[in-house]
Amino acid sequence: MSPVLHHAALITAASTAWYSVAITAAAVTAVAARTADRRRDAREVLKVLVRRNAR
């Protein structure tokens, strides 16, 4: 595998891992936050992160 493809694969894997961490953190916050405002804000963040394109 060429070094360029190797680095691209590593960057893609790292980006996927960080995205998963962000989704998990927002989901946990949306469920476990003490105040309703924080839970609502976390749900809004989830909507942005998991936004699906209309086809």
Image (tube, rainbow, N blue to C red):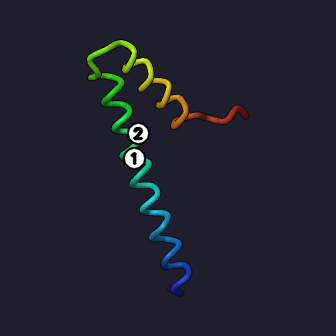
Residue 20 numbered mark, or none: 1
Taking the spot 36% from the left edge, 31% from the top edge, the residue there is 27
For residue 22, which quarter of the picture? top left
Q: Going by the picture, which residue comes out furthest to the bottom? A: 2
| Circles 1 and 2: CB atoms closer than 8 Å | yes
Provide residue 45's location: percent of width, then percent of height: 48, 30
Taking the spot 36% from the left edge, 46% from the top edge, the residue there is 21
Provide residue 39's location: percent of width, then percent of height: 37, 19
In the rendered image of this protein, does residue 9 appear above or below residue 32? below
Taking the spot 40% from the left edge, 15% from the top edge, the residue there is 37
Left or right of residue 54, residue 24 in this image:
left
Left or right of residue 34, residue 51 in this image:
right
Taking the spot 49% from the left edge, 71% from the top edge, the residue there is 9
**Label 1 sits on what residue type?**
Ser
In the rendered image of this protein, does residue 35 appear above or below residue 50? above
**The residue tagged with tag 2: helix, strand or loop?**
helix
- For label 1, count other residues whose C-alpha is less than 10 Å away and answer few (under 14), some (14-19) or many (20+): few
Marks 1 and 2, how far apart at CA: 5 Å
Q: Going by the picture, which residue comes out furthest to the right? A: 55
The residue where tag 2 is placed is: 23
**Label 2 sits on what residue type?**
Ile
Q: Going by the picture, which residue comes out furthest to the top? A: 36
Provide residue 16's location: percent of width, then percent of height: 45, 55
- For label 2, count other residues whose C-alpha is less than 10 Å away and answer few (under 14), some (14-19) or many (20+): some
For residue 40, which quarter of the picture? top left
